[in-house]
Image (cartoon, helix red, strand yellow):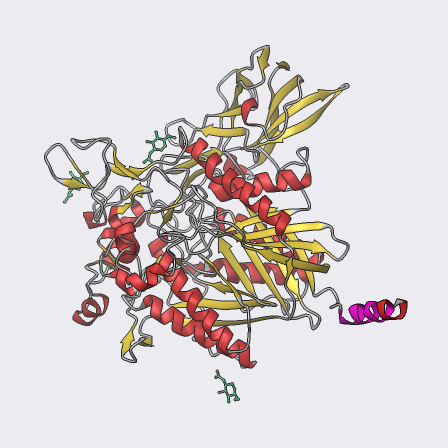
Amino acid sequence: MLYFAALLLVIALLGAPLEAFKVGVGQHDMTGPAAQVNFMGYAVPNQIGRGIHMRLHARAFVVADDSDSRVAFVSLDGGMGSDLLNIKVLARVGELLGDSSIYNYDNLAISGTHSHSGPAGFLQYVLYQFTSLGYVEETMDAFVEGISQAIVKAHNNLEEGSISYTTGNKLMDSNINRSPSSYLLNPEDERALYEDLGDTDKNMLLLKFASAQGTDLGMLNWFAVHGTCMNNTNKLISGDNKGLASYLFEKDMNGQDVLPGSGKFVAAFASTNLGDVSPNTQGPVCHSGPNEGQPCDFDKSTCKDDKGKDKNEACYSLGPGEDMFESTKIIGTNQYKHAKDLYEKATEKLEGKVDFRHSFLDMRNKEVTLADGSKGRTCPAALGYSFAAGTTDGPGMFDFTQGTNSSSPFWNVVSGFISKPTEDEIACQAPKPILLNTGDVEKPYDWDPVTVPISIFQIGDLFILNAPGELTTMAGRRLRRSIESVLKSGGVANPVVTIAGLTNTYTHYITTFEEYQAQRYEAASTLYGPHTLDAYIQEFTRITKDLLEGNESSSDPEPEDLTEKQISFVPPVIADFAPIGSKFGDVKDDAEDSYTVGSVVRVSFHGANPRNDQRIGGSFSRVERKVGSGWEVKYVDGDWCTKFSWEGGVGHAGQSTATLEWDTGEVTGDVEVGTYRICYAGTKKRITGKKEDFEGCSKEFEITQ
Ligand SMILES: *[C@@H]1O[C@H](CO)[C@@H](O)[C@H](O)[C@H]1NC(C)=O
Ligand SMILES: *[C@@H]1O[C@H](CO)[C@@H](O)[C@H](O)[C@H]1NC(C)=O
Ligand SMILES: *[C@@H]1O[C@H](CO)[C@@H](O)[C@H](O)[C@H]1NC(C)=O
């Protein structure tokens, strides 16, 4: 008997796999310019930043196998990936590591969470620069440095470890489909496959990273929802619902006392097929006009105005909260709690190899073999009319039909280059009525990407499809289903397939052929015509087969670096001035003597332009608690419970005000009673260009129960 048990033990030990992978995680601040730069996402010209609610972070995960085949996946609290970002990040990572052969186009994926409250200007194509007045070098530099540092940290943290995964239960009440009428155009038998989920995906795929000793290292998940809880009136930089979910998870794992971005544990809530998925769960309602309070038109998302005309401006969806902050909190907290639950249940370990395939695709005229065997093709990029109408998360405000007579100097320069579509292009894009024919304009530089990256990462039985846009719910399901079946016929019995959305570049939306016919916003923004999705399925299938068979993947040319050609109309900071008799950092409106827990403390200072020093990895504000004779920093500008707002710039004669807010009711964990102060750290710029740091603090105040 004993002998038998010992034999079993030996067999078990021999059979036990070695720790399958080397894993490393890292994160870094990448907030960028906190003022005077347009936000990326809504394309609303006057949505220009003036402060910080939460800092933006890049979160990196590196996984390598025994043979040192490796992939690096980065989720960033920002709008989307950008090919120029990859070009610059690869150069910077190569420089930092002193070796540029480790990470390359093929094994690096940079995916945006799709927050609509981060600075714009980090994509190199005209189409994405309309409302940011062109390229914004300050954004690009911050993103490149933040992402590169996150990757290098993950690289340096590599150790023997494991990755477990789970999908578990559905996460309800956290997303709705914002184009349900388009979803209904998909075939009934296909929709029936998802009867239990409905018209949005509700499952979260979660990966748990642990060291060989079992130490918690990190968490990465994918759940489909737009980063549009913060709406197009918000002017404070924010990671939106996913940024908050990461913040909450990291606080939970690193300890409430660890300042945001500085803990070891890294939690990323990445984006997936969120194309038609909104966090604004109240659904589209008319906010003015004769039908105020009633649902909008189901097919067109419009409301009647007082003259009886159908207009899109009054139709929008609100989130579940009282205001956008509370909505962000609800949708973010839902994701955090669900992820925490899954994290504790994630026991299924990934095993096997790490591999990848990557291809650039010239999407201007790709032949596509359709399901019935006939041939179709993709078209040069173009946007349809509904693009300008926007969505129920934020109705469109930029009137592209205005011609060259606009208040935007950038638009005045570029609009003259818009080309008229040819007969062939019109036919190819049909039934899309072409508003902006962008695919064959190269002046002043390309309007959208000419070649588009796709890639597949394999980590054991997990396959990540890195997709350069926003797939709608059904487009994503169709892509996943297709690749699952390719993998199964290639001998992978139980593949786990996920889509990493908005990765490595941005090409707007990807709808199904059926959804395309209705030409709502997502379809109007499906750049390469009705067969865009079929083309991606065909090409992802090709690189998946290459991966399975150990073949190289062929590729169209890589994108050009257009940095030298970029135009920017974002004005530079000239100089800062404090009013006569005051110094920078002097308090304008001071704190009260005491507050009870739950109150908001607000202090304002004579400030300077935050663009003078972005304080990456640092903070413009500090909430400090008195400990003995010293002060301990409790909260910074990256914390959810604080807001840093800046008022200045044009019309203020170089003078500005920084207002620091601490909402003691929004603290994660408990607020300690005691003596506090709020301090502001800034950098002023002299007319000579010389910069100097300064600081100021409020008076001491008490926090009582
Ligand atoms: C944005 O949110 C605020 C509340 O935070 C609300 O008053 C406003 O109507 C919202 N606007 C849109 C377009 O959703
Ligand atoms: C162009 O702008 C000017 C000044 O704002 C305005 O008076 C004029 O009517 C505009 N012209 C057109 C064609 O919109
Ligand atoms: C992979 O390469 C082999 C050898 O060249 C070839 O026979 C096979 O068809 C290739 N597979 C694919 C999917 O292209």
Residue at 19 percent across and 67 percent down: it is 426
Name the quarter showing ligand 1: top left
Q: Quadrant of residue 405?
A: top left
The residue drawn where x is 80% and y is 72% is: 11
Which region is colored magenta?
A: 6-15
Q: Is 367 placed above or below 148 here?
A: below
Q: Quadrant of the N terminus?
A: bottom right
Which of the 4 quarters of the picture holds residue 571? top left
559 in the magenta segment: no
As rendered, which of 520 and 336 lies closer to the eye?
A: 336
Quadrant housing the C terminus: top right
Residue at 73% across, 50% down? 215
Q: How many marks?
A: 0
Q: Position of residue 5 (x, y in %)?
A: 85, 67
Residue 36 image offset from top left, x and y in percent: 42, 38
Q: Residue 450: where, in percent of width, then height? A: 37, 67
Residue under the point 25% across and 52% down: 181
Q: Is residue 353 above or below residue 467?
A: below
Against 587, residue 245 (above or below) is below
Q: Is residue 518 left or right of residue 696?
A: left
Q: Quadrant of residue 10?
A: bottom right
From the viewer's perspective, tell me whether residue 266 is left or right of residue 83.
right
